[in-house]
Amino acid sequence: MIFSLCICTYKRVFLLKSLLEDLSRQSKQPDNIIIVDGDPKSKEILSLLTSEIWPKTWKILYVPSNHSNLSYQRYLGWKKASQLKSDYLIYFDDDLRLSQKNIIEKIITHLIENNDVVGATTEISMGEFAENQNQYKILIDRKPKSLMIVNALKMFGGSSKIKPGGLSPTGNRILPLPKEDSSFSEVLWLRGGVMAYKMSAITQDCFLDDLFALDEKRFGKGEDTILSRKVMQNGKLIYLHDVVVDHPNVDLPKTYPTAAFKLAYATAYSRRFLNDHYRITNPPNLKDRMALLKSYFGNSIINWWQAFSTFKKNKLLFALGYSFGALRGIFQKPTSENLTPNINWWQDAEEALKNQILIQ
């Protein structure tokens, strides 16, 4: 059995170092650690990997990505894991901490012992936001306080009808409920912070150049949902309740914008992409499209209500950004042809892999 672990990183060398140190203390060690660097020109990640002393059992492979978007970097990680003839692949975000010493052991054990399971994710314990991240926290915490708005959302929203572990036609993931008789629940999605897969279930078709293009323009949110839904064609996905990974929130997200207008724009436009691929292989039906329009309308109510009730600049920018993103989502399909017509993603990936470096 060959087990590879992939970490996609971007300008967060201090966080990557902490995660690698945590990994070195795990009860089960990976055969290969694949580091995909979204900022190779700085050479900071490469310097870290070559200057520190790592466990001798590790085979560390450094892949300098020629694009900084996360979904593309995950594709590079999978390509490298395939070349290494891996049986299992775990993706970790670079800003996680592993306080439990048997996290990897438990994840791999679940995949081995359940023949029909092809992917797994875990509980993620979110830490408090730092003081300099307060504005971002305010933007993403948009729960309405007005009873009138709450009732309006119940009328136009659809997520309340989705079962635990399910997924709405606009990409809203519903957390599963813990079970007394089982350490995991079956779900219809995996969360990107931690995604573990059987390599036999992942094919080239699980990765979409349209998603690469969406991420390249910094409009992408939900890339983990698309990948896991594609893999789900070959088996079941599970959510592990007995494994907890820490997310300290010591840095702002790097894979999508955090400024009010751009964050809202990306949030709205990416919903169109999730709606397009909600049914994995089949196109969305009329019901799915109506769910998207209702979602746009309901969220717009929240945004503009909060903007006019507080008269804060960032709230106004968020409402405006969401409205523009929703309009684009209605009228333009997010595809690589529309967004990045001059990029040949598959060719670029082959070029990136030619520059890989074996660290040890």
Image: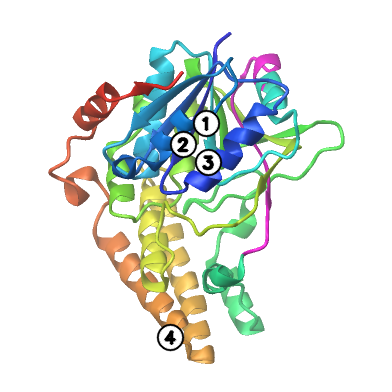
Q: Are marks 1 and 4 in contact (CB under 8 Å)?
A: no
Q: Which residue is mark 4?
A: 313
The amino acid sitting under disc 3 is: Leu
10 Å crowding of disc 1: few (<14), some (14-19), many (20+): few
Residue 107 position in % (x across, y down): 67, 26
Numbered disc 2: secondary structure: helix
Q: Which residue is mark 1?
A: 52
Q: Which residue is mark 3?
A: 16
The amino acid sitting under disc 1 is: Glu
Residue 75 position in % (x across, y down): 37, 31
Q: Which residue is mark 2?
A: 48
User: How many angstroms separate mark 2 from mark 4 (CA)?
Assistant: 40 Å
Q: Are marks 1 and 2 in contact (CB under 8 Å)?
A: yes
Rendered residue at 50%/59% (across/down)? 252
The amino acid sitting under disc 2 is: Leu
Q: Are marks 2 and 3 in contact (CB under 8 Å)?
A: yes
Q: Which residues are magenta?
A: 111-129
User: How many angstroms separate mark 1 from mark 2 (CA)?
Assistant: 6 Å
